[in-house]
Image (spheres, helix red, strand yellow):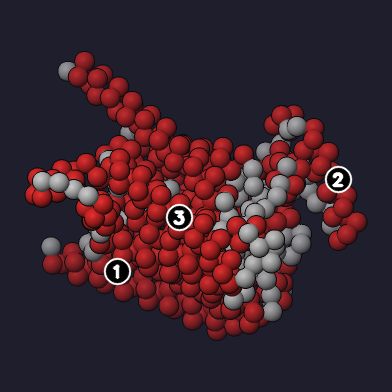
Amino acid sequence: MQDEEKRNKIWAFIITGVLILISMLYYSVNMYYIYLIVYIWFGFAYGMMLQYGRFCFASASRDLFAAGVPRMAVGIMIALVFFSLVQAFLASTNMSTFHPAPFGIHMLISGVIFGIGMVLAGGCASGSLYKIGEGNATSILAVIFGLSIGQSVFVDTGGIFNKLVPQSWMDAAHKTQEAIKTYSNIDIPLNSWFDFYLVGYVWNKPTYMIADLISNGRPTTMDYFIGNALINAILPAILLLVVIYYFYARKGFIKKRRKKKGSTGLSDELAGMWNMITASKRTSMMGVLVGITAGLHILAMKGMQNKFGINNFGQLLTRMGYTGDVSLKGTVFDPGYWYITTQEGQFGAWLLEKFGWNMHDNMFFGYVNGIPELWRNPALWMSLGIIFGAMVMARLNNEFKFKWPKGELYIWGIGGGLLMGFGSRPSLGCNIGAFFIRAAGGDPNGWVYGTGMVLGAFIGVKFFNWWTERKMAKEMEAF
């Protein structure tokens, strides 16, 4: 046992040392790579915190709906509250990289699909990454075949699928195509169904931020804190905590209080809420740290952009001569904050192009995000940082163990990953980018997607319960 602990510590130091060496090599090649290095180490920090706190939206839903355990859901709400406060401060000082997303019913539908997928795969987008760091091979299948390859094929599929696209989307997309060509002399690709969906539907949807709505588009510091943080994040989070307490934690706590005191009142209800929040200090503490770290990440990226006079890493790649890495408009995927799924899609597209599939002939990669070489992809390095950070923490806690999937886990991993990929693209984000970041940043879209995600997770849990009961019944019948 002691030998295993020693080996795990050695591995933790080796992994950390290799990342330090990689960072030094990048910086020695070109100081512009410090932008990429920042992504590496914030990813590393996220990975350590996610693993230590067992932060996973799929686990939160499964624990709540299947076992009635609110621990993880409470931790996510705590992280959201703290992140919203940091976001409001950054927005008020013009140091935020956040921007709201197009609002519409597509957010709810996408959330449902993603929610089902994350339950089937056994981990959300962020959860799957940190579980890879723990040695979970089912999560590897979900990320590689689902989030990566499946997602890239999803946005590049045309043919018969284009016949399902409404004519209004096509007309609007061609109109935008002509406008962009006139304005910037770029002939945008319109080949896949997703191209028409993105250009002809999503781009025509309005964006909202509560601070703008309550200030007629001229938000002050108070508007950011009241609108984005209090109204759009803190009050909904508190309401959800009350609902979770009432349905999942209150009964047992109040029963003990009545047995001890004879009667209960408001003070006891508040004590019960506090007891639920502090029931798992490990998860609650990580909730606070995740929220603060996510805010510091935005601050660091904005600082890098100000330092180099850019708003996208593609501009630095162009300065270094890597024009083949960027999109038609000179950009790569560079969210400026914690985000997952798009960089995995880029990884899948990069792989497919090595086998001869042209992935530049669509809007998602060709015009918007580009397909940089893996070692020059900043957001992909953030995902790798999450994996390695989780691996270090798992090693230090003696929790690393490589686990091959068995039986139907192959199907759940790949199928769930595909559904997560399909559910993240129409909404332009996942549990992190579409829910967590947006809800904390004042975008009501976050809650629309979150509602769909919870509904999908509920369906996924019910499906799993049905499958398990059916399987057990067959085994008992055979016995």
Q: Residue at x 44, y 69 (%)?
A: 293
Image quadrant for the N terminus? bottom left
Secondary structure under the numbered disc 1 in the rendered image: helix
Tell me residue 221's x, y (percent): 58, 72
Report how far apart the C-alphas of labels 1 and 2 lie in the structure: 56 Å
Secondary structure under the numbered disc 3 in the rendered image: helix
Tell me residue 66's x, y (percent): 30, 37
Name the kind of residue labelled 2 in the image.
Lys
Q: Is residue 217 left or right of residue 113?
A: right
Tell me residue 67's x, y (percent): 26, 39
Q: Residue at x 57, y 66 (%)?
A: 224
Q: Residue at x 51, y 51 (%)?
A: 435
Tell me the residue that label 1 is attached to: 11
Report how far apart the C-alphas of labels 2 and 3 lie in the structure: 41 Å
Name the kind of residue labelled 3 in the image.
Leu
Tell me residue 353's x, y (percent): 64, 51
Q: Are marks 3 and 1 in contact (CB under 8 Å)?
A: no
Is residue 466 visible to the viewer in this orientation of the structure?
A: yes
Q: Relative to 118, does residue 93 appear above or below in the rendering? A: below
Q: Are marks 1 and 2 in contact (CB under 8 Å)?
A: no
The dot on residue 175 is: 2
Nearer-N-terminus badge (2/3)? 2
Q: Residue at x 72, y 76 (%)?
A: 319
Secondary structure under the numbered disc 2 in the rendered image: helix
The dot on residue 235 is: 3
Report how far apart the C-alphas of labels 3 and 1 lie in the structure: 43 Å
